[in-house]
Amino acid sequence: MLSINAERFLADMEELAQIGATASGGVSRPALGAQDLQARAWLQSKFESLGLDYEQDGAANQFGTLRADVADAKTLLIGSHLDSVPDGGRYDGALGVLCALEVVRRLQESEHKLPFHLACVNFTDEEGTLMGLMGSRAVSGQMSADDLQNPRGGRSRLEAAMQRAGISDASILGARRSPDNLLGYIEVHIEQGTRLEQAELQVGVVTALVGIRMKRLTFTGQAAHAGTTPVNARRDAFLGVADFALRAHDLVLQKHMPGVVNVGEVAVEPGAFNIVPGQVTAALEFRHGSQEELDALEHDLLSLAQTVADERRLELEIDGLGEVRPAAMDVTLTRHIEAASEVLGLGHTRLMSFAGHDPQNMANIVPSALLFVPSVDGISHNPREYTPPQDCINGANVLLHTVLRLAENSE
Amino acid sequence: MLSINAERFLADMEELAQIGATASGGVSRPALGAQDLQARAWLQSKFESLGLDYEQDGAANQFGTLRADVADAKTLLIGSHLDSVPDGGRYDGALGVLCALEVVRRLQESEHKLPFHLACVNFTDEEGTLMGLMGSRAVSGQMSADDLQNPRGGRSRLEAAMQRAGISDASILGARRSPDNLLGYIEVHIEQGTRLEQAELQVGVVTALVGIRMKRLTFTGQAAHAGTTPVNARRDAFLGVADFALRAHDLVLQKHMPGVVNVGEVAVEPGAFNIVPGQVTAALEFRHGSQEELDALEHDLLSLAQTVADERRLELEIDGLGEVRPAAMDVTLTRHIEAASEVLGLGHTRLMSFAGHDPQNMANIVPSALLFVPSVDGISHNPREYTPPQDCINGANVLLHTVLRLAENSE
């Protein structure tokens, strides 16, 4: 049975981890910064030394393609991203690119004849130093000219990055690809959670990437002297947010699992020891696996916020701050991943991804799939992020056999 | 029965309210700023036109003294402060100085022979633009050279103010007065609360100014990905603060009334939509009438914080950030105020002051008293602060008759 060259694969992993290496053992490679550019050059040289077709598109996505000797062959994309959060870990993103690189290389040297072109892809700025999932948004046509004017990291940072990468607004928008010549997209990623670890399973087969909705809740009461205003005569906006946050978590636990909710930031006005809070703004985020589940969760959370406001004689204002739509993964691809795991004797389970990944964009234009390998203690976006070598190897082998199954089933 | 000249008193009030007047109908006279200096010059000219002994001490406190024709007479101080918070109201402080001015003037023109010197005082910086209760702290010897190096408003602001007022560190510390030649201190002030208004009473006789304790509570959990970390697997520091704040208010209502508690400022780290709060710092303040009551309240609040931390698997750190000790008012003086209110047919009640005032310092060296008149809706430190004219007049008349009763009882 074909399997990857584990030694070579782990050596690549070690080599790549030196680029942007931090003292604490992680890597810091913000998108299109100096370290990311160095990692990209490393990947390009790997592609070129293998004799793969190398291409960088208008959004600076990199492709190394093993071309099939078939007329009108479509392309199967496999990969992930090389950029990291500032002071991040070695595995998030990099693992998926290295699995894809090794799978392409193994199939090339095994002289396996594929009925499709197989391209290893490194998507630009998955982590959002610039705008988040930028490369896959561009490729899948999920980006507008307006988006480029107001990116998450600020326009001036994006402009500097575009200049360093030799791309432009126009080239990014032009990176959109027609689904007609694409077969699908498959990504290996670390779980960034503990479900696999706790279940002692090797492979997580993602059924959907959850949708995310963000709201700003503003509770307004009456700022007051914290000495002269009796406790039972106050309209304390902080107590409103406190009450809401506690009851929102209970609500999710009782009725919306495995959905999640977070009150991640709170601003208290005027904000002094001796003044009862008059206005408090809370950043609310919640996630669930489908639009229906998100709608139900949103309804319950916002009703709760209004109930709390009414009970405490507070005014409530709710601002929507955008959303990420849930993305279902392709059923056929997920079944191939499960079958490949079986062949390799690896324990697997279906689960949802509660973090965003490039397949959520790619699923808009082509059948897409995402598979997880375990993360120790679920630590992520942190230098202590760790996945044992065997789990990394498993991920690459599952990807290899998934590609092989697709090849068999396409012939 | 002697009473103040209400027309003259209200005309003074109107005239003084023009100094530092704001568009919204209040006044802005931060201590020793241009407007406060103008108000002080106005008061000095009032004193001098009456032929009172005028003195400004080393802490810039102003005294206008009606001298008794008695050997070895002591001095009774009556007054308050002319400074305001930025963009404050007309009544906080100013009312007490104007009541005292009118009482001195009325007794002077009535040729009443007092057995003590009667001094109208304007204490410097009660509101804390510079350091808070500065004038009375200096007079009562509650200030150190260190305090002057680290004032609440910053050293450079204090230095500029000292230069404008022609005072120095040395002169401020030298303003300390011996209690030997002082008889007492009595102040009229607006309530800054609604207890009198709700009870439809005209006079509040303060039994004690509450003590205040300030703590910084830091709850530490684990910052985590708000998507991939299930709700029941988190150590969310914000939920700790939320739970504490709600239960702390219930605790005070059930067990420590009329004590008060406030969580007035909260800082969430890292503070993002998609990160479970890892560390949250809360500014906690609580007030009560005696050291014993404060000790009991502190014990219960800090035990509660630890209980919440334990229940939620959080670490808790508690930092003390100083305190204001409670100050009991003089029993004999408060009885004279009650008797004076009776004579005038005014409804009165005993209560505690939950805000700080100069009598809390003066009580350290001489018998001191504080009486409140109503504030509409309890609004304070705000241009909308309002006390109807008749309530202002009542305050001045109660002060007048309290002074007369003291004179009778000293003879």
Image: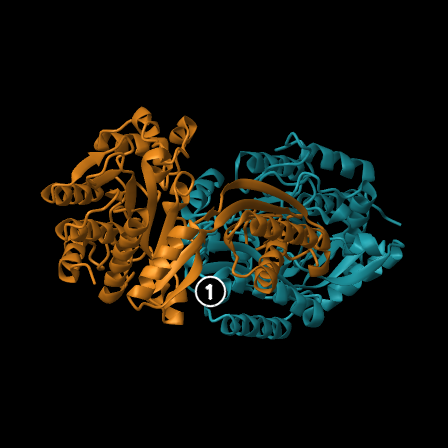
Chain colours: A cyan, B orange
Residue at image position (80%, 41%) is A389
- Which quadrant of the view contains residue A367? bottom right
Q: Is residue B346 visible?
A: yes
Using the image as rendered, state which of residue A193 and residue B159 is in the foreground. Answer: B159
Q: Residue furthest top?
A: B170
* B145 in relation to B233, above or below: above
* Residue situated in front as seen by the camera: B346 or A32: B346
Give the crowd class for mark 1: few <14, some 14-19, many >=20 residues within 10 Å: some
Give the x, y percent position of residue A235.
46, 65
Count the marks: how many?
A: 1
Confirm whether residue B129 shows in the render. no
Amino acid type, label 1: Arg
Quarter the N terminus of chain B occupies: bottom left
Q: Is residue B228 left or right of residue B68?
A: right
Quadrant of the rendered image containing residue B58: top left
Q: Mark 1 lies on which chain?
A: A
Q: Is mark 1 on a helix, strand or loop?
A: loop
* Relative image position of residue A93 (x, y in whole percent): 66, 46
Residue at coordinates 64% horizontally, 36% vertically from top-left? A27
Q: Position of residue A18 (x, y in %)?
A: 67, 31
Residue extending farthest to the front is B411
Q: In this view, does A68 lie to the left or right of B73?
A: right
Instruction: Please give the residue where the numbered disc 1 appears in the rendered image.
Output: A234
Looking at the image, residue B32 lies above or below residue B258: above
Which is more toward the observer, A223 or A68?
A: A223
Q: Position of residue A164 (x, y in %)?
A: 47, 38
